[in-house]
Image (cartoon, rainbow, N blue to C red):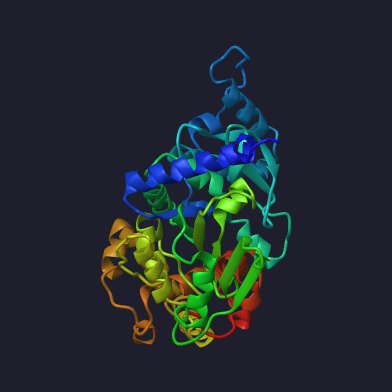
Amino acid sequence: MTRPSQNSLVLDGEDVKIRLLAERIETQSVVHVDWLRFTCYLRNAETPSVDLLFPSLTMNVWDDDFRKAQINRVLASIPDGDFLPAAQALELAGKVATVLGDDFQVSAEIRKGHDFYKSRWSIERNGHECGWVGFLTSGKNAKQAAQARTLHVNLYGTACTFARHGWTDRLASLIEEVKGDITRCDLALDFFDGFEGGLDQVTQDYRSGLCNVGGRKLKCNMVGDWINGRERSFYMGSKEAGKQTNVYEKGHQLFGADSDSKWVRVELRYGNKLRVLPVDMLRRPSDFFAGASDWHALMLTRADAIPSPERIKAMSRLALETVQAEVNRSVRWAMDVAGPTISAAFRYFGDGFLALCEHKKPPARLARFSGAELAQAFQVAEQRVHQSSDLGSPFFLSDRDCPHFLHINPSNAGPAFS
């Protein structure tokens, strides 16, 4: 009978474990970033290089840059209106691949998009897709028109695991450079040799109230063979709240249910529903893992780490409605009342325009909100301004027309979550 260690999945599992252990030693962090998604506006993405704007298509199969010629031919074949977004997406994909390391490259072909994006450039490792950059949309409604002005990067767990050490710091800087917004970030804490009690201890922690947040017991869900103790997963929280934790037997997933692996993973999945996810999550994943709850901080101590919790606060439905309403009023006043003056000042003051106002305090109606709340609300207001100019509609569209990647729709935000 073939032993599990000869199975390709098992060999991959051993590679994963070796990589994670090496990363832990290199970064001195027990928490690993295991999935990442972020979005940026096209206007903030880098202008395509001269090679992309004015490609040379005379290369042949003997040239070292034959693959670049393939990409140039692909770009040359697409409609003029789609060229710039495609080229900008390619530039961003190339930068992300460089951040990940020498083993990663961008596919030489444009593929069908995901998540309502029309097309994508794949980021590959050893010929297999491990991430992508989406661009354009196929729909014409207001929501998709807003999305068409964005680029979206999605990095799978494989990319995060096999990237060159230090990739999270480099990618954090890139996200800041393109003024991107993180829309999903998974933080994983691995117990390669398990911990006392394992999944049974986690369920006991839950029953005793150790996993409560703000005095409230989170939703839970149990998946797998709990009777025989195989391939078990224990979920806490919810995707709708933008914060969910999955504690599962990672060793069984990689090496098979009959293996003797005691490897348990605690995976915290953050989404930007009701939250603004800071880029520093990539630089200090352990701090934000610990900040999820007292139980998450406890799990860090079980991994012999010293927690330094940093919380990402959730905004309630009322808070979302209030900050958005106040920002909308301020933007409407700026457009309708001060617009002509602002336009003239911007035109004639030149570089000195920002110096006039950059140190001014926010108006009184906005002073009570945090910078993160204001940033999120102004992004939505900006989208509405662009939509009104493109679609010939009034400035203030309904909340359901907010772009999906911001996840700040008060109509379905629900109650407050922690």
Residue 233, picture quadrant: bottom right
Considering depth in this image, is 259 or 335 the residue closer to the camera? 259
Considering depth in this image, is 19 or 191 the residue closer to the camera? 191
Q: Residue at x 66, y 61 (%)?
A: 145
Residue 72 position (above or below residue 253): above
Give the image location of residue 315, x and y in percent: 47, 80
Q: Residue at x 59, y 83 (%)?
A: 414
Q: Residue at x 69, y 57 (%)?
A: 116
Q: Residue at x 38, y 81 (%)?
A: 369
Quarter the N terminus occupies: top right
Asked if residue 114 shows in the view, the reply is: yes
Give the image location of residue 418, x and y in percent: 47, 79
Asked if residue 293 shows in the view, the reply is: no
**Number of numbered discs overlaid on the protein picture:** 0
Residue 392, picture quadrant: bottom right
Residue 321 position (above or below residue 151): below
Q: Residue furthest top?
A: 62
Residue 207 position (above or below residue 286): below
Q: Residue furthest front?
A: 1
Give the image location of residue 391, x and y in percent: 67, 66
Considering depth in this image, is 32 or 349 the residue closer to the camera? 32
Residue 142 position (above or below residue 128): below
Give the image location of residue 250, x and y in percent: 56, 54
Query: In the displayed structure, does residue 340 sit left or right of residue 90?
Result: left
